[in-house]
Amino acid sequence: MTATDTHCPYCALQCGMTLTPEIPRVRLEPRDFPVNKGGLCAKGFTAADLLDHRDRLLTPLVRKGDRSSPLREATWDEALDRIAAAITTAQQKYGRNSVGAFGGGGLTNEKAYALGKFVRVVLRSSSIDYNGRFCMSSAATAANRSLGIDRGLPFPLEDIAQAKTVLLVGANPADAMPPSMQYLDAGREHGARHIVVDPRRTNTAAGAYLHLQPLPGTDLALANGMLHIAIREGYVDRDYLEARTTGFEAVKAATNAYWPERVERMTGVPENRLRETVRLLATQGPAMILTARGAEQHSNGTDTAQAYLNLALALGLVGRPFSGYGTITGQGNGQGGREHGQKADQLPGYRKLDDPAARKHVAAVWGIDPDDLPGPGKSAYEMLTDDSLRVLMVLASNIVVSAPHSNHVRSKLEALDFLVVSDIFRSETAELADVVLPVAQWAEEEGTMTNLEGRVLRRKRALPPPPDVKSDLEMLAELSGRLSRDFESDPRAVFDELRRASAGGIADYAGITYERIEREDGVFWPCPSEDHPGTPRLFADSFPTKDGRARLIAVQHRDPAEMPDKQFPYVLTTGRNMQHYQSGNQTRRVKALNVALPEPRAEIHPDLARRHGIADGDLVELRSRRGAAVLRARLSDGIRPDTVFAPFHWPGANALTNPALDPHSRMPAFKACAVAITRLIP
Ligand code: SF4
């Protein structure tokens, strides 16, 4: 049996592993790859369970009648004919944009690219977006406008081990991607100090030198308060600001009002801890600031990420060795997934869809007239809830569980004329579909992924898919044929086309080949030619902005879109558990993970629990203005007494969340909404 080196199907760390098909099961072993250095978390170790899982979709499913009739097995021809007919009917009746697609940050680069091309060239529709809008869009928007480029970490993970001070804001790598902790642990061994900003004492916070516990939604005020202190105490790097940035004076003025006593009142973080954090960042270098979804998934998420960028720039951290600002991407191909055109406003190479030069370049690669390219579409939540959308194809997403205000999204999906879901399991979203397509998964097909460092990796085929299962690329090609367009389905050929489409763009993959990835343990973009070494570290000399300078942008605190009140007196924040991934469509089916954590737990402070007569293990109902969810209580003095935490890996948490959108990124406010809590009678 041949052993194949590949990567984990889950998160953005993309740990290396080796798969060997054996009878009766595939053997999975960790691999000494530069990212994980032989480590895997429980999700990675058990990932082979997905390959022969008894819930696996093995044949297309269609409904005989309307939505009330059950899904039944069908041939691919029948399923694809039905989809093609539904697309044609809807577009004739309602126009091209009535048909759309929703992609995912788990799709390979090839699939993300192909899906964007399929919607714009075959469907000639502008209706496309993906679940990364719910994930990374605020940090991406802030980085693009401030640094001229969005690459989650602009340096390799190994730099984290060299930093002497690391500020982690709304990030919990100890639970989300445990093997990445080796870099923080190595730093700690040589005296590094880590400060974690999180309303909960997570496993990451528990091991930190300092834990700052702000009220959810006040991270921006915290950053502005730190910059206020840095300015007053003479820590800003004037030479760096002069030579490499613009906008400092406006930011300085904007932070005037964030004096420490006021910030303590706004955030709940003691003033002395704020001062200590600034002192460490400014004097115990190299230092870095890393944000993640806790800070970003707010109705002011872009400005919040910007506030931390302002702080990093004012301290002169960005572009210096083992220093800087980064954001920790979550989904497996969260980075590559946002570079190749499945976003509503974007073309491959991280090009803008409304940029005439970008349209001309990509249209030439696609062999079409630039005028035939549709314009930008609506963002994920706006598209999903727009009544003019009549037919939707969903790839690699379980939006009934993962979208905000999920009951509303469910009702909109139920009201569609036709819903298609391609997946490996019958997810909650697939249960609503008119056609479900069984597709190949990670170890059954070739493709590339781009991890949180911007390192392009190869996922390789270790075993064939089941007989009646196709890859998403084959599915798109066969559907295109029915809609009278040729479409490439070979991953290597798609990647070569992606390289040409991305050439000259921000995310330039032109010099990256499957062979180089293999030889070099991945290649960092931008990589404009085959003799270019790739770019592990960005910003050493300049920023990819028009004038080569980074922009500090003045930002002000705004209250979360929904504040606690008498009726809904607590703040709900959502997040991850170590044992599960995203909507749980995969990990809830893995026995070892499900045994370790079989159900969601609402984390509640004992003081709050006492007020409502709640004991550890009681069932409680959380209620927001949009819906309700029943969870078992887990009492913890590690969470703020005014805040409740609920994991999003099961249906429920997102019935509560607020779809208020960030005005810049269109990111929903997943991390703060108002809830009431009631103990249920056992
Ligand atoms: Fe997979 Fe992420 Fe766990 Fe690594 S950390 S094994 S990539 S889930």
Image (cartoon, rainbow, N blue to C red):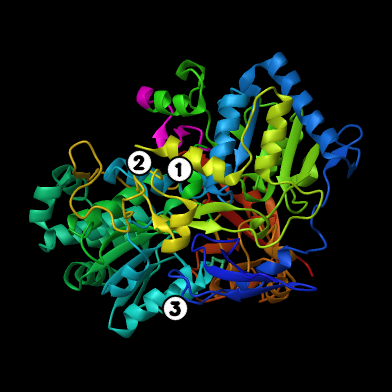
Magenta residues, dominant SS class: loop
Labels 1 and 3 touching (C-beta < 8 A): no
Q: Is residue 151 left or right of residue 540?
A: right
Left or right: 124 in relation to 196: right
> Is there any visible trace of residue 340 in the rendered image?
no
Label annotation for residue 506: 2
Q: Which residues are magenta?
A: 342-357
Q: Earlier in the sequence, mark 1 or mark 2?
A: 1
- Residue 91's place in the image compared with 637, above or below, is above
Quadrant where the image shows the N terminus: bottom right
Q: Secondary structure at mark 2?
A: loop
Residue at 57%, 37% in the rendered image: 114
- Sequence-wise first label, 3 or 2: 3
**Residue drawn at x 71%, y 41% as measured from the top left:** 410
Tag 1 residue: 339
Is residue 629 placed above or below 17 in the rendered structure? above
**Nearer the observer, 579 or 498:** 498
Residue 598, image x and y in percent? 72, 70
Q: Secondary structure at mark 3?
A: helix
Say if mark 1 contacts mark 2, CB within 8 Å. Answer: yes
Classify 10 Å Cα crowding around label 1: few (below 14), some (14-19), many (20 and above): many
- Tell me if mark 3 has few (under 14), some (14-19) or many (20+) residues whose alpha carbon lies within 10 angstroms of its own: some
| 347 falls in the magenta region | yes
Using the image as rendered, state which of residue 490 and residue 352 is in the foreground: 490
Asked if the residues shown at circle 3 and circle 2 are in contact, with their CB atoms under 8 angstroms apart, the answer is no
Instruction: Residue 666 in the image: state x and y as whole percent.
Output: 47, 38
- Whether residue 41 appears in this view of the structure is yes
Queried whether the magenta region covers residue 223, the answer comes back as no
Quadrant of the snapshot with the C terminus? bottom right
Q: How many labels, in total? A: 3
Q: Amino acid at mark 2?
A: Ile
